Amino acid sequence: MSKTDDIRTIGIIIIGNEVLSGKIRDENTPFLIESFNRAGLRVGETAIVADYVPRLAEVIRNFSERFDLVVTTGGVGPTHDDCTWQAVAVALDEPLELHEELVNRIETRSGQKMTEEQKRMALLPRGTTMHLNDGRWPLLQARNVIVMPGVPSMVTGRIEALCARLARPRPWLATVYFTADEWVCVPAIDAVVAAFPEVEIGSYPVFYPADHKLRLTFEHAEETQVRQAVAQVTDAIGRDNFVRETWRPPTDVSVDPT
């Protein structure tokens, strides 16, 4: 894996009954989405799936076929409910094998031999590789599926390092604010969407006290496309309703304004 890899789209799978039952709050999804988007990588879909191998394998296979890269969190320990690697093996049609390099790494760091029960967490699909193994836990990848623990503190550093490797320019982003209500602006929004089908346009009504009632966003790799779309919708909604506009160029990694 290198920075030159043509990774554009990401699928995220959060795994664990504990998340679906509410015993554990999912902190990984917001972090992953924000991190990947700051790195110019598009998150195409997220899923939260139970510890059930047939369904989990189905979702992993589907995501693997649809997205450039899949990132899963959870279910990688040695206990009965840690079945992520089994599901990945089924999804990719690869046998599980003891990953000797991972075993050696764990034993070296812990200073003791792994038991047979502990080695379950090193049973990985054939061909699994290790990346970024300078921290507490390496980044493990089977084809285009990266499998991580569910503990947020073990996700943060690895994902930040991954994003640094895969980062690409983000599209131009313009955010335009209006005092008009969204529902009266629908014809203008429909018209600009039809005129600029390649520009990603978002419409967000505002109900809390603010100097605007509507926020429109426009994203595209080409600045000209974005500026033309902004000009058209501003003319259609009316300058009397215009509050302001903000721009984020591709090299800007700051947080988007709300």
Image: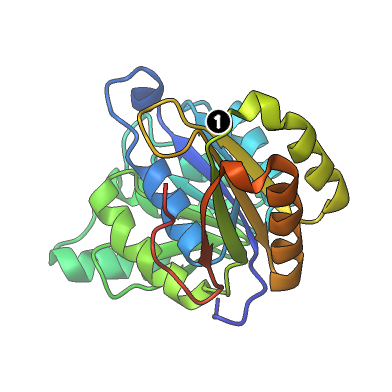
Q: Is residue 195 left or right of residue 22?
A: right
**Up-down: is 153 above or below 14?**
below
Label 1 packing within 10 angstroms: few (<14), some (14-19), many (20+): many
Residue 50 percent across, percent down from the top left: 48, 25
Q: Residue at x 87, y 50 (%)?
A: 195
Say if residue 117 shows up in the picture. Answer: yes
The answer to which of 212 and 218 lies nearer the viewer is 212
Say if residue 66 shows up in the picture. Answer: no
The answer to which of 72 and 196 lies nearer the viewer is 196
Residue 34 percent across, percent down from the top left: 43, 53
Residue 145 percent across, percent down from the top left: 57, 55
Q: According to the image, label 1 marks what residue?
A: 53
Q: Is residue 107 left or right of residue 37?
A: left
**Up-down: is 54 above or below 251?**
above
Tally of numbered tags: 1
Name the kind of residue labelled 1 in the image.
Answer: Val
Q: How is the image coloured?
A: rainbow
**Up-down: is 199 above or below 74?**
below
